[in-house]
Amino acid sequence: VVVNAPKQPAIALQDVLVLSGDVAMGSQLGNNISWEQWPASGVNANFITRAAEPDAVEKLKGSVARVAMY
């Protein structure tokens, strides 16, 4: 029996909150935000990360966009 274990990524990754769809000015973020894996070396201190704010999606989905976001 051969068991294949899940392969680890070749580089370190970190979950970052991203906009997953267009949001018009004045609209709620709603389901247009999600976690996406980014190379840890490219994560800016200003990014919202799951490690720092694991409940960010729930906190921010009711927020209203002050500008259009693409």
Image (cartoon, helix red, strand yellow):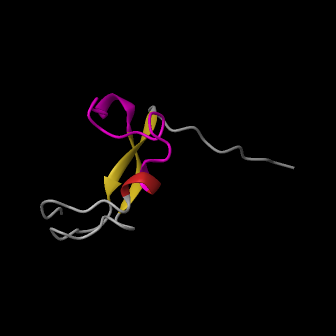
- Quarter-wise, where is residue 60 in the image? bottom left
Figure quadrant of residue 14: top left
Residue located 22% across and 68% down the image: 23
Indicate whether 51 appears above or below 25. Answer: above
Measured as percent of width and height from the top left, residue 56 is found at: 43, 48
Residue pictured at 32% horizontal, 53% vertical: 18
Please check the rendered image and state whether residue 48 is part of the magenta-colored stretch, yes or no: yes
Any magenta on residue 2?
no
Give coordinates of residue 13: x percent, y percent: 44, 37
| In the image: residue 68, left or right of residue 41 | left
Q: How many marks?
A: 0
The quarter of the picture where the C terminus appears is bottom left
- Which region of the structure is painted magenta? 39-57
Residue at x-position 30% and y-position 38%: 47
Q: Please state the horizontal and vertical placement of residue 7, each as a whole percent of the image.
A: 60, 41
Task: From the viewer's perspective, tell me whether residue 26 is left or right of residue 36.
Answer: left
State the image coordinates of residue 9 (x, y, percent, origin top left). 51, 38
Whether residue 9 is situated above or below residue 23 in the rendered picture: above
- The answer to whether 22 is drawn above or below residue 41 in the figure is below
Is residue 20 placed above or below 10 in the rendered structure?
Answer: below
| Direction right: furthest residue | 1
Nearer to us in this view, 57 or 15: 57
Question: What residue is at 42 percent from the left and 52 percent from the top?
Answer: 59
Q: Is residue 19 left or right of residue 66?
A: right
What is the residue that sits farthest to the left in this orientation?
67
Magenta-colored segment: predominant secondary structure = loop
